[in-house]
Image: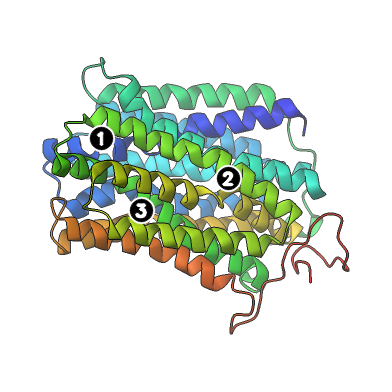
């Protein structure tokens, strides 16, 4: 894979994600205009994550047998239809869910298949760096989807935001079609006679499954944060009487998410040069501490809340690239698509449940106007980093995950699905 193709597939990922968090950005408006409860708002903001998880199980195993480029282009088209449909036809909870389903299919068919294109084209240190860089595009795309409602304030109505996401999907289709070469045949002959939807090899790969579960904890936390941070900042600003507009707060939330990109790249590079599990464990502990601090000071001075929200948001995103690189290295080469399917199923299924659970906790403990309810919400988010920390402990009761050694290594190298000892 040349640099042009890597840049094209990375830009297409960002374009596809312009509709990723746009609903979360306008959630306060939809709560009022569509008469949604907090739980319904949580479902609407996260429904595409659940669809993403299911669609990944259907699409990703196929990339072990067909060119992932075809899957990516078809998925970008689904995202474009989902954007235009939400803009023109959605008028309530159920119609909103229907068009967000197409956005979920698009996310499943672009992010991980793109990761597989890179993994199939590169090897060794180059692959680790490229996959970490590509995975780090996720915070950039997420941040832009939060930023759109604020950079287009003069446009009447929120519908235009989703028209933009539809056009971005069409642009991504053209970019991938023109710049990403067809995959040279890398299909293992025995795969042609095998059912692509068998996952036994993946579930028996203990190293890969530990990273799968770690990713589930990571996405639980980060998507809970993304779905509710704008509404939380509005609550804090109103409580403090600062008179800050929702537009400014959305920009601030977008900056937090985008700042996760350089943090993810930095941690991804560290994971190539140092023990991977140690780096991931350090990020998990730091994120857990940040969630506890944000919960403890959720009702204090508004600017303290802003600072703690920024710290928590950036640290929470920091292990995105390292986890993407880890699962690629842990996967057996002829089961890489299936491994990424399970990785996505657990991760984004957990992300949907995280945002919904946060909404349920918020509703049950007092609602969006209660400071104690927000404290419970951030503690619920922090449970994801606790999972990562426990799974990657040096000597867990169920066995340690082999650490990824520095390059050059000083110990024997075993097959990638076994890790390094």
Do the CB atoms of the residues marked 1 and 3 lie less than 8 Å apart?
no
Percent of width and height locating residue 374: 23, 56
Residue at 57% x, 61% y is 282
Q: Residues within 10 Å of mark 2 (few under 14, many from 20)?
A: many
Q: Secondary structure at mark 2?
A: helix
194 horizontally vs 224: left or right: right
Q: To which residue does mark 1 refer?
A: 26
Percent of width and height locating residue 288: 44, 62
335 horizontally vs 213: left or right: right
Percent of width and height locating residue 132: 65, 45
Q: Residues within 10 Å of mark 1 (few under 14, many from 20)?
A: many
**Residue 262 vs residue 130, the one in the foreground:** 262
**Residue 375 vs residue 345, the one in the foreground:** 375
Do the CB atoms of the residues marked 2 and 3 lie less than 8 Å apart?
no
Q: Secondary structure at mark 3?
A: helix
Residue 264 numbered tag: 2
Q: How far apart in space, not on screen, are marks 2 and 1 (Cα)?
A: 26 Å
Residue 224 numbered tag: 3
Quadrant in which the N terminus appears: top right
């Amino acid at each position: 894979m040349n640099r042009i193709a890597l840049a094209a597939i990375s830009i297409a990922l960002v374009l596809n994600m312009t509709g990723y968090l746009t609903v979360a950005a306008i959630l306060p408006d939809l709560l009022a205009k569509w008469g949604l409860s907090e739980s319904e708002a949580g479902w609407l903001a996260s429904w595409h994550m659940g669809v993403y998880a299911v669609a990944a199980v259907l699409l990703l195993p196929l990339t072990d047998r067909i060119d992932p480029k075809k899957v990516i282009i078809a998925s970008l088209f689904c995202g474009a239809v989902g954007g235009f449909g939400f803009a023109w036809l959605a008028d309530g909870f159920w119609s909103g869910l229907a068009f967000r389903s197409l956005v979920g299919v698009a996310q499943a068919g672009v992010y991980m298949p793109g990761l597989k294109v890179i993994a199939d084209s590169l090897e060794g240190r180059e692959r680790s760096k490229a996959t970490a860089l590509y995975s780090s595009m996720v915070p950039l795309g997420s941040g832009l989807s939060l930023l759109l409602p604020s950079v287009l304030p003069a446009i009447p109505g929120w519908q235009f935001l989703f028209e933009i996401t539809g056009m971005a999907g069409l642009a991504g289709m053209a970019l991938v079609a023109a710049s990403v070469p067809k995959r040279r045949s890398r299909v293992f002959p025995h795969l042609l006679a095998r059912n692509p939807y068998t996952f036994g090899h993946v579930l028996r790969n203990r190293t890969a499954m530990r990273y799968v579960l770690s990713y589930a904890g990571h996405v639980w936390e980060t998507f809970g944060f993304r779905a509710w941070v704008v509404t939380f900042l509005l609550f804090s600003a109103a409580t403090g009487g600062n008179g800050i507009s929702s537009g400014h707060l959305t920009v601030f939330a977008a900056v937090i998410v985008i700042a996760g990109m350089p943090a993810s790249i930095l941690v991804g590079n560290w994971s190539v040069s140092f023990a991977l599990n140690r780096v991931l464990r350090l990020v998990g502990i730091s994120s857990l501490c940040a969630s506890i601090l944000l919960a403890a000071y959720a009702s204090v001075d508004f600017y303290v809340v802003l600072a703690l929200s920024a710290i928590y948001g950036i640290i929470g995103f920091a292990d995105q690239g390292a986890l993407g690189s880890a699962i690629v290295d842990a996967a057996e080469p002829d089961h890489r698509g299936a491994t990424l399917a399970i990785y996505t199923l657990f991760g984004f299924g957990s992300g949907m449940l995280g945002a919904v659970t946060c909404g349920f906790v918020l509703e049950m403990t007092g609602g969006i106007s209660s400071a104690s309810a927000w404290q419970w919400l951030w503690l619920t988010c922090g449970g994801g980093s606790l999972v990562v920390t426990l799974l990657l402990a040096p000597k867990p009761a169920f066995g340690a995950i082999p650490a990824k050694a520095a390059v050059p290594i000083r110990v024997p190298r075993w097959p990638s699905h076994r890790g390094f000892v």
